[in-house]
Image (cartoon, rainbow, N blue to C red):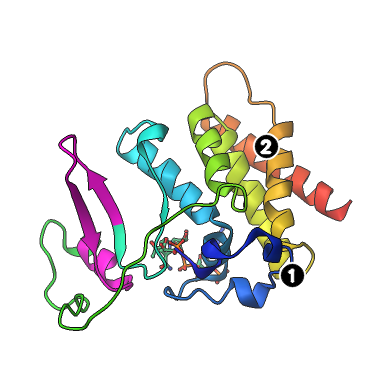
Protein backbone atom coordinates (compact mmCIF):
# COMPACT_ATOMS: atom_id res chain seq x y z
CA UNK A 1 0.00 0.00 0.00
CA UNK A 2 1.24 3.50 -0.85
CA UNK A 3 3.19 5.97 1.22
CA UNK A 4 0.26 8.38 1.40
CA UNK A 5 -1.67 5.80 3.40
CA UNK A 6 0.37 6.70 6.46
CA UNK A 7 0.22 10.49 5.94
CA UNK A 8 -1.67 12.64 8.47
CA UNK A 9 -5.17 13.76 7.41
CA UNK A 10 -4.33 17.45 7.62
CA UNK A 11 -1.81 17.25 4.74
CA UNK A 12 -4.03 15.40 2.27
CA UNK A 13 -5.93 18.49 1.11
CA UNK A 14 -2.83 19.77 -0.68
CA UNK A 15 -1.65 16.53 -2.33
CA UNK A 16 -0.69 17.33 -5.94
CA UNK A 17 -1.03 15.03 -8.98
CA UNK A 18 2.77 14.76 -9.03
CA UNK A 19 2.80 13.56 -5.41
CA UNK A 20 -0.10 11.16 -5.93
CA UNK A 21 1.60 9.66 -8.99
CA UNK A 22 4.86 9.00 -7.10
CA UNK A 23 3.97 5.53 -5.79
CA UNK A 24 6.85 4.38 -3.57
CA UNK A 25 6.90 0.74 -4.66
CA UNK A 26 4.82 0.09 -7.80
CA UNK A 27 5.21 1.53 -11.31
CA UNK A 28 1.68 1.61 -12.77
CA UNK A 29 -0.65 3.68 -14.95
CA UNK A 30 -1.98 7.05 -13.71
CA UNK A 31 -5.51 5.96 -12.76
CA UNK A 32 -4.56 2.99 -10.61
CA UNK A 33 -1.67 4.97 -9.09
CA UNK A 34 -4.02 7.78 -8.06
CA UNK A 35 -6.42 5.13 -6.76
CA UNK A 36 -3.58 3.73 -4.67
CA UNK A 37 -3.02 7.19 -3.16
CA UNK A 38 -6.71 7.63 -2.26
CA UNK A 39 -7.01 3.93 -1.30
CA UNK A 40 -9.83 3.51 -3.82
CA UNK A 41 -7.65 0.75 -5.32
CA UNK A 42 -7.75 -1.06 -1.99
CA UNK A 43 -11.50 -0.54 -1.79
CA UNK A 44 -11.96 -2.06 -5.25
CA UNK A 45 -9.74 -4.98 -4.22
CA UNK A 46 -11.96 -5.55 -1.16
CA UNK A 47 -14.99 -5.74 -3.47
CA UNK A 48 -13.03 -8.14 -5.71
CA UNK A 49 -12.14 -10.40 -2.78
CA UNK A 50 -15.76 -10.31 -1.57
CA UNK A 51 -17.05 -11.41 -4.98
CA UNK A 52 -14.23 -13.73 -6.13
CA UNK A 53 -13.92 -15.67 -2.89
CA UNK A 54 -17.52 -15.34 -1.69
CA UNK A 55 -16.38 -13.79 1.61
CA UNK A 56 -18.56 -11.54 3.75
CA UNK A 57 -17.14 -7.99 3.97
CA UNK A 58 -16.50 -8.25 7.71
CA UNK A 59 -14.06 -11.11 7.10
CA UNK A 60 -11.86 -9.02 4.78
CA UNK A 61 -9.37 -6.70 6.49
CA UNK A 62 -7.06 -4.04 5.04
CA UNK A 63 -3.67 -3.28 6.61
CA UNK A 64 -1.12 -0.66 5.55
CA UNK A 65 2.17 -2.31 4.55
CA UNK A 66 4.56 0.30 3.09
CA UNK A 67 7.09 -2.23 1.73
CA UNK A 68 4.53 -3.99 -0.57
CA UNK A 69 6.18 -7.39 -0.07
CA UNK A 70 3.19 -9.18 1.44
CA UNK A 71 0.42 -9.04 -1.16
CA UNK A 72 -2.26 -10.93 0.70
CA UNK A 73 -2.74 -13.07 3.77
CA UNK A 74 -5.24 -15.72 4.70
CA UNK A 75 -5.94 -16.44 8.37
CA UNK A 76 -7.26 -19.90 9.17
CA UNK A 77 -9.71 -20.88 11.89
CA UNK A 78 -6.85 -22.21 14.05
CA UNK A 79 -5.18 -18.77 14.14
CA UNK A 80 -2.35 -19.51 11.69
CA UNK A 81 -1.75 -17.18 8.75
CA UNK A 82 -0.38 -17.87 5.25
CA UNK A 83 1.14 -14.82 3.50
CA UNK A 84 1.89 -14.47 -0.21
CA UNK A 85 5.20 -12.56 -0.53
CA UNK A 86 7.49 -11.30 -3.28
CA UNK A 87 9.26 -8.06 -4.15
CA UNK A 88 6.72 -5.77 -5.88
CA UNK A 89 6.90 -6.85 -9.54
CA UNK A 90 3.85 -7.40 -11.77
CA UNK A 91 5.80 -9.94 -13.89
CA UNK A 92 5.11 -12.49 -11.17
CA UNK A 93 1.27 -12.43 -11.18
CA UNK A 94 1.26 -12.04 -14.97
CA UNK A 95 3.54 -15.10 -15.34
CA UNK A 96 1.34 -17.03 -12.93
CA UNK A 97 -1.73 -16.18 -14.98
CA UNK A 98 -0.03 -17.10 -18.27
CA UNK A 99 1.54 -20.31 -16.97
CA UNK A 100 -1.22 -21.58 -14.68
CA UNK A 101 -1.24 -24.21 -13.24
CA UNK A 102 2.57 -24.22 -13.66
CA UNK A 103 5.01 -21.65 -12.31
CA UNK A 104 7.33 -20.09 -14.92
CA UNK A 105 10.98 -20.33 -13.90
CA UNK A 106 12.77 -16.98 -13.48
CA UNK A 107 9.62 -14.91 -13.97
CA UNK A 108 10.74 -12.52 -11.22
CA UNK A 109 13.29 -12.30 -8.40
CA UNK A 110 12.34 -13.69 -5.02
CA UNK A 111 12.77 -12.03 -1.64
CA UNK A 112 16.45 -11.75 -0.61
CA UNK A 113 16.35 -13.50 2.77
CA UNK A 114 20.11 -12.94 3.33
CA UNK A 115 19.65 -9.16 3.75
CA UNK A 116 18.19 -7.71 6.93
CA UNK A 117 14.90 -5.94 6.29
CA UNK A 118 11.85 -4.71 8.15
CA UNK A 119 8.23 -5.26 7.19
CA UNK A 120 5.75 -2.87 8.78
CA UNK A 121 2.02 -3.37 9.19
CA UNK A 122 -0.16 -0.46 10.31
CA UNK A 123 -3.89 -0.13 10.87
CA UNK A 124 -5.80 1.81 8.24
CA UNK A 125 -6.92 5.35 9.18
CA UNK A 126 -10.54 5.12 7.99
CA UNK A 127 -11.21 8.78 8.79
CA UNK A 128 -8.40 10.13 6.61
CA UNK A 129 -9.00 7.49 3.92
CA UNK A 130 -12.75 6.81 3.65
CA UNK A 131 -12.42 4.89 0.36
CA UNK A 132 -12.32 1.41 1.87
CA UNK A 133 -15.42 2.02 4.02
CA UNK A 134 -17.20 3.46 0.98
CA UNK A 135 -16.27 0.41 -1.09
CA UNK A 136 -17.45 -1.92 1.68
CA UNK A 137 -20.80 -0.11 1.62
CA UNK A 138 -20.96 -0.28 -2.20
CA UNK A 139 -20.00 -3.97 -2.22
CA UNK A 140 -22.46 -4.88 0.52
CA UNK A 141 -25.28 -2.95 -1.13
CA UNK A 142 -24.29 -4.41 -4.48
CA UNK A 143 -26.61 -3.94 -7.46
CA UNK A 144 -25.52 -0.80 -9.38
CA UNK A 145 -23.70 0.95 -6.52
CA UNK A 146 -20.19 -0.49 -7.17
CA UNK A 147 -20.41 0.61 -10.83
CA UNK A 148 -21.55 4.07 -9.73
CA UNK A 149 -18.68 4.37 -7.26
CA UNK A 150 -16.14 3.29 -9.88
CA UNK A 151 -17.49 5.59 -12.61
CA UNK A 152 -17.69 8.63 -10.33
CA UNK A 153 -14.18 7.93 -9.11
CA UNK A 154 -12.77 7.66 -12.66
CA UNK A 155 -14.31 11.03 -13.55
CA UNK A 156 -12.90 12.59 -10.37
CA UNK A 157 -9.42 11.12 -10.92
CA UNK A 158 -9.37 12.61 -14.42
CA UNK A 159 -10.35 16.00 -12.98
CA UNK A 160 -7.73 15.71 -10.24
CA UNK A 161 -4.96 14.82 -12.70
CA UNK A 162 -6.07 17.80 -14.88
CA UNK A 163 -5.73 20.11 -11.88
CA UNK A 164 -9.50 20.72 -11.67
CA UNK A 165 -10.16 18.98 -8.34
CA UNK A 166 -8.49 18.81 -4.94
CA UNK A 167 -7.20 15.43 -3.77
CA UNK A 168 -9.64 15.18 -0.85
CA UNK A 169 -12.54 16.36 -3.05
CA UNK A 170 -12.22 13.14 -5.08
CA UNK A 171 -13.89 11.04 -2.40
CA UNK A 172 -16.22 13.83 -1.23
CA UNK A 173 -17.60 13.97 -4.77
CA UNK A 174 -17.78 10.20 -5.16
CA UNK A 175 -19.69 10.02 -1.86
CA UNK A 176 -22.16 12.68 -3.05
CA UNK A 177 -22.83 10.80 -6.29
CA UNK A 178 -23.26 7.50 -4.42
CA UNK A 179 -25.69 9.18 -1.98
CA UNK A 180 -27.76 10.59 -4.85
CA UNK A 181 -27.94 7.31 -6.74
CA UNK A 182 -31.29 5.52 -6.70
CA UNK A 183 -30.60 1.89 -7.74
CA UNK A 184 -33.16 0.57 -10.23
CA UNK A 185 -35.77 -1.79 -8.84
CA UNK A 186 -36.41 -5.27 -10.20
CA UNK A 187 -33.94 -7.70 -11.72
CA UNK A 188 -30.45 -6.36 -12.29
CA UNK A 189 -29.54 -6.30 -15.99
CA UNK A 190 -26.40 -5.36 -17.91
CA UNK A 191 -28.29 -2.45 -19.42
CA UNK A 192 -29.27 -1.34 -15.90
CA UNK A 193 -25.62 -1.36 -14.79
CA UNK A 194 -24.48 0.49 -17.92
CA UNK A 195 -27.23 3.06 -17.45
CA UNK A 196 -26.16 3.61 -13.81
CA UNK A 197 -22.57 4.00 -15.02
CA UNK A 198 -23.62 6.62 -17.60
CA UNK A 199 -25.71 8.45 -15.01
CA UNK A 200 -22.81 8.49 -12.51
CA UNK A 201 -20.39 9.93 -15.07
CA UNK A 202 -22.84 12.64 -16.14
CA UNK A 203 -23.79 13.53 -12.55
CA UNK A 204 -20.11 13.70 -11.52
CA UNK A 205 -19.22 15.94 -14.48
CA UNK A 206 -22.17 18.21 -13.62
CA UNK A 207 -20.99 18.50 -10.00
CA UNK A 208 -17.42 19.17 -11.11
CA UNK A 209 -18.41 21.93 -13.51
CA UNK A 210 -20.61 23.44 -10.79
N1 LIG B 1 -0.06 -1.82 -13.30
C1 LIG B 1 -0.28 -2.63 -12.27
O1 LIG B 1 0.66 -3.00 -11.53
C2 LIG B 1 -1.65 -3.10 -11.96
C3 LIG B 1 -2.72 -2.79 -12.78
N2 LIG B 1 -3.96 -3.27 -12.47
C4 LIG B 1 -5.09 -2.96 -13.35
O2 LIG B 1 -4.73 -3.21 -14.70
C5 LIG B 1 -5.36 -2.25 -15.56
C6 LIG B 1 -4.30 -1.52 -16.37
O3 LIG B 1 -3.40 -0.88 -15.48
P1 LIG B 1 -2.15 -0.10 -16.07
O4 LIG B 1 -1.54 -0.90 -17.17
O5 LIG B 1 -1.28 0.28 -14.91
O6 LIG B 1 -2.87 1.21 -16.62
P2 LIG B 1 -2.46 2.19 -17.82
O7 LIG B 1 -3.17 3.47 -17.58
O8 LIG B 1 -0.98 2.21 -17.99
O9 LIG B 1 -3.06 1.49 -19.09
C7 LIG B 1 -4.45 1.43 -19.29
C8 LIG B 1 -4.62 1.09 -20.75
O10 LIG B 1 -6.00 0.88 -20.98
C9 LIG B 1 -6.35 1.60 -22.16
N3 LIG B 1 -7.74 1.98 -22.08
C10 LIG B 1 -8.36 2.72 -21.13
N4 LIG B 1 -9.67 2.86 -21.39
C11 LIG B 1 -9.89 2.16 -22.53
C12 LIG B 1 -11.04 1.92 -23.30
N5 LIG B 1 -12.24 2.41 -22.94
N6 LIG B 1 -10.92 1.17 -24.41
C13 LIG B 1 -9.72 0.66 -24.76
N7 LIG B 1 -8.57 0.83 -24.05
C14 LIG B 1 -8.67 1.60 -22.95
C15 LIG B 1 -5.46 2.83 -22.17
O11 LIG B 1 -5.35 3.33 -23.48
P3 LIG B 1 -4.70 4.80 -23.77
O12 LIG B 1 -3.26 4.74 -23.43
O13 LIG B 1 -4.96 4.99 -25.21
O14 LIG B 1 -5.46 5.75 -22.88
C16 LIG B 1 -4.15 2.23 -21.67
O15 LIG B 1 -3.37 1.66 -22.73
C17 LIG B 1 -6.16 -1.31 -14.64
O16 LIG B 1 -7.50 -1.75 -14.59
C18 LIG B 1 -5.50 -1.49 -13.30
O17 LIG B 1 -6.41 -1.22 -12.27
C19 LIG B 1 -4.19 -4.04 -11.38
C20 LIG B 1 -3.18 -4.35 -10.53
C21 LIG B 1 -1.85 -3.90 -10.75
C1 LIG C 1 0.29 -4.43 -8.15
C2 LIG C 1 -1.08 -4.37 -7.66
O1 LIG C 1 -1.77 -5.37 -7.59
C3 LIG C 1 -1.61 -3.07 -7.28
O2 LIG C 1 -2.99 -3.15 -6.99
C4 LIG C 1 -0.85 -2.52 -6.10
O3 LIG C 1 -1.19 -3.26 -4.95
C5 LIG C 1 -1.15 -1.07 -5.96
O4 LIG C 1 -0.57 -0.54 -4.84
P1 LIG C 1 -1.39 -0.25 -3.50
O5 LIG C 1 -1.41 -1.54 -2.76
O6 LIG C 1 -0.57 0.83 -2.85
O7 LIG C 1 -2.74 0.22 -3.90
Q: Residue furthest top?
A: 186
Q: Quadrant of ligand 2?
A: bottom left
Q: Secondary structure at mark 2?
A: helix
Q: Secondary structure at mark 1?
A: loop
Q: Is 191 placed left or right of 181 in the picture?
A: left
Q: Which is nearer the N-term, disc 2 or disc 1? A: 1
Q: Is 73 placed left or right of 29 in the picture?
A: left
Q: Residue at 30% across / 68% down in the picture? A: 69
The residue identified by callout 2 is: 178
Q: Residues within 10 Å of mark 1 (few under 14, many from 20)?
A: few
Q: Is 141 placed left or right of 200 in the picture?
A: left
Whether residue 180 can be seen here: yes
Residue 120 in percent (x, y) is at: 36, 65
What label sits on residue 76 in the rendered view?
A: none
Q: Quadrant of the N terminus?
A: bottom left
- Quick check: is 80 in the magenta stretch? yes
Residue 178 in percent (x, y) is at: 67, 37
Residue 32 in percent (x, y) is at: 52, 63
Q: Residues within 10 Å of mark 2 (few under 14, many from 20)?
A: many
Residue 203 in percent (x, y) is at: 77, 43
Q: Is residue 110 above or below residue 103?
A: below
Q: Give the CA separation, mark 2 to mark 1.
A: 23 Å
Q: Is residue 68 above or below residue 58?
A: below
Q: Residue at 43% across / 44% down in the picture? A: 46
- Quick check: is 71 in the magenta stretch? no
Q: Residue at 76% across / 62% down in the picture? A: 166
Labelled pair 2, 1 in contact (Cβ < 8 Å): no
The answer to which of 65 and 34 lies nearer the viewer is 65
What label sits on residue 162 in the rendered view?
A: 1
Whether residue 199 can be seen here: no
Which stretch did the figure color magenta? 72-96
Q: Residue at 56% across / 66% down in the picture? A: 4
Amino acid sequence: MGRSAAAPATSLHDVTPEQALAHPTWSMGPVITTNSATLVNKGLEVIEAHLLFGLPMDRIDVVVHPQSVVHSMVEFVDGSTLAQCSPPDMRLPIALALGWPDRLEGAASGVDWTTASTWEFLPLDDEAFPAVAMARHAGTTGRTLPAVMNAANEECVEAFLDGRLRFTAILDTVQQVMDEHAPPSGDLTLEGVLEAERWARERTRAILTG
